[in-house]
Amino acid sequence: METKTRFIETATRLFAERGYYGVSIAAVANELALTKQALLHHFGSKEKLYGEVLQTISNRLMEDMSRIVQASENPREGFEACLMYFYDALQSRPDDTLVLMRELLDNKQRAENAKTWYLKPFLDSLCDMALAASPKRLKNQAQAFVVVYQILGAMKYFLVSEPTLVQMFGSKNWKAFTEHYEPELRALIAARLD
Amino acid sequence: METKTRFIETATRLFAERGYYGVSIAAVANELALTKQALLHHFGSKEKLYGEVLQTISNRLMEDMSRIVQASENPREGFEACLMYFYDALQSRPDDTLVLMRELLDNKQRAENAKTWYLKPFLDSLCDMALAASPKRLKNQAQAFVVVYQILGAMKYFLVSEPTLVQMFGSKNWKAFTEHYEPELRALIAARLD
DNA sequence: AAGGCAACTTACCAGGTGGTAGGTGAATCG
DNA sequence: CGATTCACCTACCACCTGGTAAGTTGCCTT
């Protein structure tokens, strides 16, 4: 595998665990037994490395998502399938989920330097899909956005809480929670679109 | 006001903005035109300062919540009022909300230290209330927990996104979102209990 | 008046931070 | 073959990090 790709994968894991400020570029490089200057050679700066991490996550989501959307027949089914796919994707890549959540919290600080909104197109397309899926229920863009955001919040907050909930209630209860969560998430989505 | 209290307030704001690793004790002290050694005099270490910040938030939240829980009469109405009150509380103190969210993400790292589950009694009582509020819909503890967690996720994720959404969509759109959010949150809660 | 103590201060430290400058050896290419 | 490019290196920089040591100042108690 290319060194640059390995840098991005390692950085994704470390940023997920400790956040942007909690990870030094030297720490990322050490994981691959390279020097931080090797990293700087490939990315130029820490901020650009972080940008590529976000871009990679964003690309992965957008590509898979557009595939799902095209495969669907009617807007409503496509939107629901898209959301459930998103839930599976977040569940199967917890590091991506954590990085996205951290980015949400951090980017007030970084916004001045990095003015790129990697996830905005993703949010926009979800809102458009929501409007198409439930034109009677959702009267305008703002309302569609709010409903989409409720659904995203319900799934992301739960997935991001795994370590805490396992420690709080034990892994047996956590397993029970996850088994209940998917059907309840479908029910939530349906309830929000009717 | 006591210097120590002012330190905690300033630290809460900065930790909310940049996270634990993103804030130096010197930065906190500078905000109050004091030296970092003044801070160390009061708290001993950065970790202890952070602990006091968490404790202060936890105390504030628990006090408010226990007051509300006692005041409820009808289980269903009491539960809904409780959730909406919680939404208002989070909304009125965005820094507290951000710090709690960050702690949720970080405590996989600090799992050893994080044995203070300040939110567990709160979660437990919410689950009990949910079961009492909708005994026909919710068959067991796990199901009640899942539904409660969906609602909490929907509100917390939205509130935590303010800085990002303001920059992404502008403050005018953000205002439109917040106006839609409260009624839609009530609708979400109702839909999840029927 | 004397002592103690809380609330600060300056001076300092070892180690880490992101980043620059200027290489080295190996592969590629005209 | 020589020139260039690539992927990496060592050396170095100015600044920042949390934390220690040792005062200094002014109020409170005895």
Image: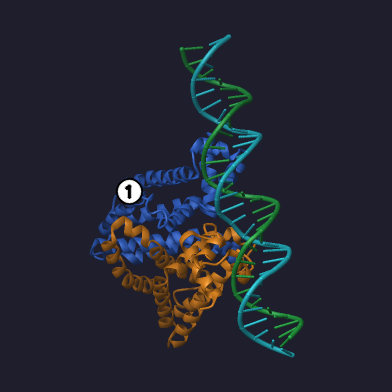
Chain colours: A orange, B blue, C cyan, D green
Between A178 and A72, the residue placed more toward the observer is A178
Q: Position of residue B154 (x, y in %)?
A: 42, 63
- Tell me the quadrant of the picture where the N terminus of chain B can be found: top right
Between C3 and A164, the residue placed more toward the observer is C3
Q: Is residue A140 visible?
A: no
Q: Is residue B37 visible?
A: yes
Residue type for callout 1: Val
Establish if B94 lies above or below B3: below
Q: Sort mark 1 into few (<14), some (14-19) or many (20+) by Cα contacts within 10 Å.
A: some
Query: Is residue A63 rendered to the left or right of residue B32?
Result: left
Between A150 and B38, the residue placed more toward the observer is B38
Establish if B173 lies above or below B1: below
Between A134 and A170, the residue placed more toward the observer is A170
Residue at the spot 46% in from the left edge and 65% down from the top edge: A98
Q: Position of residue B96 (x, y in %)?
A: 47, 50
User: Chain letter of disc 1?
Assistant: B
Q: How many marks?
A: 1
- Tell me the quadrant of the picture where the C terminus of chain B can be found: bottom left
Query: Is residue A177 rendered to the left or right of residue A110?
Result: left
Query: Is residue C3 rendered to the left or right of residue A174?
Result: right
Q: Which residue is mark 1?
A: B69
Q: Position of residue B141 (x, y in %)?
A: 25, 60
Considering the numbered disc 1 on the image, is that residue within a helix, a strand or a loop?
helix
Q: Quadrant of residue A112?
A: bottom right
Residue at the spot 58% in from the left edge and 62% down from the top edge: B166
Q: Position of residue A149 (x, y in %)?
A: 47, 67
Q: Quadrant of residue A157?
A: bottom left
